Amino acid sequence: MIENKRLDVRKMTLMAMICAVAITAVAVIRIPIVAFLYYEPKDVAIAIGGFLLGPFAALLMSIVVSFIEMLTISADGFYGLLMNIISTSTFVCTAAFIYKKNRTMAGAVIGLIVGIAVNVPVMLLWNYLVVPLYLGVPRQAVAGMLVPIFLPFNLVKGVLNAAFIMLLYKPLSAALKKAGMFPAAAKVAPATRRINLGVTIVSLFAILTCVLYVIVLRSDSSDNNGQYYENYNVEAESNGHDSYDED
């Protein structure tokens, strides 16, 4: 009984730490991707927490972080809260659920890929439903933004999240186990080291690819669609809203 209570306290402490890191990431790191949308790496922290603690813990952290974000640094109110919870939970809970069933490198990769595959269409649907209500713009205008704006944004966001998770999960989980948050980690076999090196190379290549793609995407957007984005932002501001920067 005492040992179970200690585990619960450690689990709650770890969840609180992860939520704090995620909120800090939102406040400090905002990278422009396309048009008025920004990448914030909070999902990386929450997904790592989901890998460590399971999908239900990932869902709780998604809700807590989104709620704190609404109360502190976000001006998007209920709509921002709703979109943040849906965006984060569809990705991290899916990945954590699959990894829980298969706690291997392959399980992690499959979980992240499926998480992206679930997140992207879900967010296209919810952007189509919510953005017109939030900004007061015609739904037809939002429909025209789904493929050129929201689709590449969510794909780039998902790939970046997956790459950072693959780079950070093993070192962080080993450090937490060493600190006594979890049972001590077993020694890493040489074959696992080779796999980790391969994962590191692939993850870095994915990050580099996304960076180059975003540079080209923003350049094309500026050259070809700048007037469209400007008109959209003016229309949004005329309805009493800032430029939309949610998922």
Image: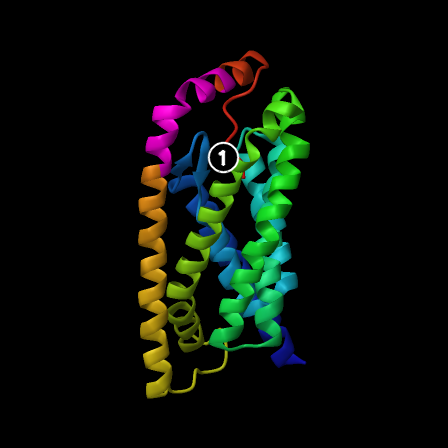
Q: Which residues are magenta?
A: 217-232
Q: Is residue 35 above or below residue 62?
A: above
Q: Is residue 78 left or right of residue 40?
A: right
Assign the C terminus to one quadrant of the image.
Answer: top right
Q: From this viewpoint, is residue 124 visible?
A: yes
Q: From this viewpoint, is residue 73 visible?
A: no
Q: Position of residue 181 (x, y in %)?
A: 49, 73
Q: Position of residue 71 (x, y in %)?
A: 57, 35
Q: Is residue 189 above or below residue 68?
A: below
Is residue 230 a member of the stretch shown in magenta?
Answer: yes
Q: Is residue 114 left or right of residue 34?
A: right
Location of mark 1 (residue): 148
Q: Position of residue 192 (x, y in %)?
A: 38, 82
Is residue 190 a member of the stretch shown in magenta?
Answer: no
Q: Is residue 245 left or right of residue 32?
A: right
Farthest residue in the front direction? Answer: 224
Q: Is residue 81 left or right of residue 206?
A: right
Nearer the observer, 243 or 26: 243
Amino acid identity at mark 1: Pro
The chief SS type of the magenta part is helix
- Quadrant location of residue 111? bottom right
Rendered residue at 54%/77% (across/down): 103
Q: Position of residue 134 (x, y in %)?
A: 63, 26
Rendered residue at 61%/47% (across/down): 121
Nearer the observer, 234 or 53: 234
* Secondary structure of the residue carrying numbered label 1: helix
